[in-house]
Amino acid sequence: MPPYSLDNRLVIGIASSALFDLEESDAVFRRDGEEVYRTYQREHLDEPLRPGVAFPFIRRILSLNDLAPEGDPLVEVIILSRNDPDTGLRVMRSIRTHRLPISRAVFMQGRAPYRFMPALNMSLFLSADEDDVREAVASGLPAGRVLGSAVADDPDDPELRIAFDFDGVLADDASERVFRQDGLEGFRAHEALNVTTPHDAGPLRDFLREINTLQRREEERRRADASYAIRVRVSIVTARNAPAHERAVLSLNNWGVTVNDAFFLGGVDKSAIMDGLKPHIFFDDQESHLEGTSRTTPSVHIPFGVVNQEGVERAEQGRQ
């Protein structure tokens, strides 16, 4: 029998800390240590973990496998966990209880599992562990840290709404560096001068490309079945506004990717937009933006680029 191939699939790695609410378990680990934590997980083995920040996103994106023949899924989700296999049993039983079609997992006791992302063809890794995510992004891997707590999920809503910031997420941080150095007017002049030059890709550009592949499969289904309702909707929510919006749109065209909606806010608070848009996940590179959105929206910090380098440097200086 040939090996199971992860090629030509959207593969997402997710830590148990992003998929489930582990606040109680983590409190036991921090307060009482590993052995007590291990005993606690055994004693609660048949008590399902509650959904976490990324649960609605994962549930919906896995539901899109009904667009493909059975046994040949478009989407694979694989657990990447710092737990050992023993304590990971509760995670896998919780997955079964919640009826998530996730069967593959990597458990590495106390070690960062993101190193296996390339081997598993992953386009995204989600975790609540800040160090793991920062190290993954520093290694050039597409990773994000989930923020906030789980929000209410409507099981009768079939849509999957995904929102992205632009600079530092879909695009690199070159323009952000200009803004930091030359201010708003310098940034606008730079974008006008380079309007026809596409941005280099950021950490999640290829993930958006994979989402577009799912959207094309939906369009194929709709052409075959006029009653089929499109489920995936993608938005950009960015602090850019006119005229800097033009380079962003032309970059998307050059990359061969598309979005359904674009919000060019020019500094307007993004959390107000999220309240209306209600995405199931929102990716941004600036924690200051996510402080507001994470109260009501599943939010993911992408620690990429100059904004986050400055934050790390400030934190290190504060510890000295």
Image: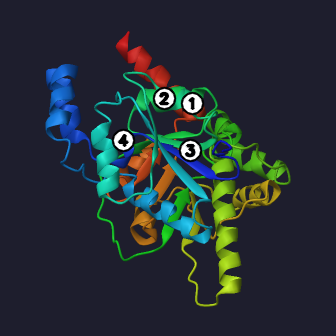
Which residue is outermost to the right? 196
Provide residue 116's location: percent of width, then percent of height: 57, 30
Q: Secondary structure at mark 4?
A: helix
Residues at circles 2 and 3 in contact by the CB criterion of under 8 Å: no
Q: Which x, y percent locates residue 270? A: 46, 58
> Pointer 1: what residue?
116
N-terminal of the two: label 3 or label 1?
A: 1
Mark found first going from the N terminus, 4 or 1: 4
Q: Are marks 4 and 2 in contact (CB under 8 Å)?
A: no
Mark 2, secondary structure of its residue:
helix
Q: Which residue is mark 3?
A: 124
| Dot 1: element | helix
CA neighbours of label 2 inside 10 A, class few (<14), some (14 to 19), many (20+): many
Front one among 13 and 318: 13
Q: CA distance from mark 1 to mark 2?
A: 6 Å
* Mark sitting on residue 16: 4
- Say if residue 260 shows up in the picture: yes
Residue at 61% in and 26% down: 139
Label 1 close to label 2 by CB (< 8 Å): yes
Percent from the top left, x then y, of residue 120? 60, 38
Q: Earlier in the sequence, mark 3 or mark 4?
A: 4
Alpha carbon separation for disc pair 4 and 2:
12 Å
Residue drawn at point x = 36 percent, y = 60 percent = 99
Q: Give the Cα separation between the discs numbered 3 and 1.
A: 12 Å
CA separation, marks 2 and 3? 13 Å
What whole-number distance in Å separates the C-alpha atoms at marks 3 and 4?
Answer: 14 Å
- Seen in the picture, residue 282 relative to 158 is either above or below; the reply is above
| Labels 2, 3: front one | 2
First reached walking from the N terminus: tag 2 or tag 3: 2
Question: Nearest the camera: 254 or 8?
Answer: 8
Q: Residue furthest bottom?
A: 226
